Image (spheres, rainbow, N blue to C red):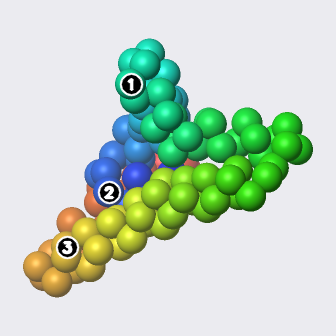
């Protein structure tokens, strides 16, 4: 998830914070609304709870796979597509985002 958000966002610090705040905030929001509570299963925190508890059944494995596809594969695919689009536009500097200053400087 962090790599995908890093590709989608220009600033690494924002991507870092978003990789924590986005799934946790969505999990809390979905849990607070009774009608949307079942959708909490599609957040990383919900599927990891089953994985870490050792109580994985067939449904939990399907849930884990869906979360992996949504949060891992899709974000990375969107980030890669955006990077290709930036490269296709002819501006290689914008494709790489802002260069972070070296620690030695």
Q: Residue 26: in sight, yes or no?
A: yes
Q: Residue at x 64, y 59 (%)?
A: 62
In the picture of the structure, the residue carrying the numbered disc 2 is: 8
Q: How many marks?
A: 3
- Between circles 1 and 2, the one closer to the viewer is 1
On the picture, is 80 further left or further right than 47?
left
In the rendered structure, are the residues bearing label 1 and label 2 in contact, judged by CB atoms less than 8 Å apart?
no
Q: Position of residue 56 (x, y in %)?
A: 81, 49
In the rendered image, residue 31, in percent from the top left (x then y), is placed at: 49, 22
Q: Residues within 10 Å of mark 2 (few under 14, many from 20)?
A: many
Ranked by sequence position, the earlier of labels 2 and 3 is 2
Residue 103 image position (x, y, % from top left): 54, 48
* N-term-proximal mark, 1 vs 2: 2
**Residue 32 higher or lower than 77, as above or below:** above
Q: Which element is circle 1 on? A: helix
Q: Nearer the viewer, mark 3 or mark 1?
A: 1
Check the image and name the residue furthest to the top. Answer: 32
* Residue at figure coordinates x 31%, y 51% from the top left: 9
Q: Which mark is residue 35?
A: 1
Q: Are marks 3 and 1 in contact (CB under 8 Å)?
A: no
Residue beneath the point at 70% across and 50% down: 60
17 w.r.t. 87: above or below: above
List x then y, in percent, for residue 76: 43, 66
The Cα atoms of the two marked residues, 2 and 3, are separated by 11 Å
Corner quadrant of residue 80: bottom left
Q: CA distance from mark 1 to mark 2?
A: 30 Å
Mark 1 is surrounded, within 10 Å at the Cα level, by few (under 14), some (14 to 19) or many (20 or more) other residues, namely few
Q: Is residue 37 left or right of residue 54?
A: left
Which mark is on residue 11? none
**Is 4 or 58 nearer to us in this picture?**
58
Q: CA distance from mark 3 to mark 1?
A: 40 Å
Label disc, if present, on residue 86 of the rendered structure: 3
């Amino acid at each position: 998830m962090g790599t995908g958000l890093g590709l989608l966002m220009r600033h690494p610090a924002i991507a870092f914070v978003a990789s924590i705040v986005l799934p946790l905030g969505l999990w809390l929001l979905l849990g607070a609304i009774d009608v949307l509570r079942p959708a909490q299963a599609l957040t990383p925190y919900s599927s990891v709870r089953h994985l870490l508890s050792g109580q994985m059944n067939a449904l939990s494995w399907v849930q884990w796979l869906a979360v992996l596809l949504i949060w891992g594969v899709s974000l990375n695919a969107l980030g890669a597509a955006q990077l290709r689009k930036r490269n296709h536009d002819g501006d290689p500097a914008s494709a790489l985002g802002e260069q972070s200053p070296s620690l030695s400087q």
